[in-house]
Image: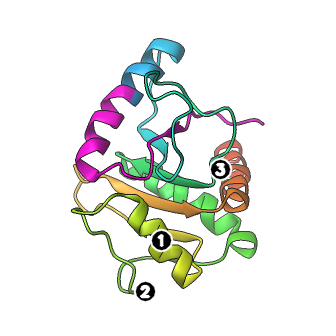
């Protein structure tokens, strides 16, 4: 698989508060292993870590992936990748398009439960302020594979 990013399992009970620690650990891992950092984080909030005592990326694609962008130019790239693959993955849903919502008092996996019930593959809550993170909830391994293909296409063909 030609992925350029690591995805880390969080577990079904991971809360939004726990995500802050996970983002810090992700940053440490990426800078230690690659010497660089792209302002994107990839987490599998419905996958239990193989060894909770070790912070290590998943060996393959996760069933569900939470992509977090902390840079507006990457938001544009992610949306272009999703739009490029829309025939395969369907519409990107935003707040107001659906009854899905983020309840910050519940585990992150709650969003995926809502997506499963609504049969939605992509849900996004994009940041509007430069300091706000954007969240892209990708449901299903096939959807993530299509996104991966779209991301490679968009970044390869950037003008």
Give, as a single range, the part of the protein colored magenta. 1-25
Q: Taking 123 as reference, is 157 left or right? A: right
Query: Nearest the camera: 51 or 81?
Result: 51
Q: Earlier in the sequence, mark 2 or mark 3?
A: 2
Relative image position of residue 132 (x, y in whole percent):
25, 54
Relative image position of residue 39 (x, y in whole percent):
41, 38
Q: Residues within 10 Å of mark 2 (few under 14, many from 20)?
A: few
Disc 1 from disc 2: Cα separation: 14 Å
Residue 100: quadrant of the picture: bottom left
Q: Taking 106 as reference, is 125 left or right? A: right
Residue at image position (45%, 76%) is: 114
Q: Earlier in the sequence, mark 1 or mark 3?
A: 1
Q: In the structure shown, which secondary structural element does the residue marked by tag 2 occupy?
A: loop
Residue at image position (75%, 35%) is: 2
Name the disc covering residue 113, or none.
1
Residue 83 vertical placement versus 42 (above, below): below
Name the disc covering residue 98, or none.
2
Residue at image position (66%, 51%) is: 154
Q: Which of marks 2 and 3 is in front?
A: 2
Residue topped by disc 3: 151
Disc 2 from disc 3: Cα separation: 25 Å
Disc 1 from disc 3: Cα separation: 25 Å
Q: Earlier in the sequence, mark 1 or mark 2?
A: 2
Residue 159 visible, this angle: no
Q: How crowded is mark 3: few (under 14 residues within 10 Å), some or many (20 or more)?
A: many
């Amino acid at each position: 698989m030609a992925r350029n990013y690591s995805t880390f399992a969080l577990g079904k009970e991971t809360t939004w508060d726990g995500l802050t620690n996970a983002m810090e650990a992700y940053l440490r891992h990426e800078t230690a292993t690659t010497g660089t950092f792209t302002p994107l984080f990839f987490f599998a909030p419905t996958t239990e870590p193989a060894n909770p005592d070790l912070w290590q990326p998943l060996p393959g694609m996760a069933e569900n992936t939470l992509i977090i962008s902390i840079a507006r130019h990457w938001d544009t790239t992610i949306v272009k990748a999703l739009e490029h693959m829309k025939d395969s993955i369907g519409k990107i849903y935003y707040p107001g398009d659906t009854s899905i919502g983020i309840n910050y008092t519940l585990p992150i996996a709650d969003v995926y439960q809502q997506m499963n019930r609504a049969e939605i593959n992509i849900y996004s809550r994009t940041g509007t302020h430069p300091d706000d993170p954007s969240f892209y909830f990708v449901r299903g391994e096939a959807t993530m594979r299509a996104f991966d293909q779209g991301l490679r296409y968009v970044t390869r063909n950037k003008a």
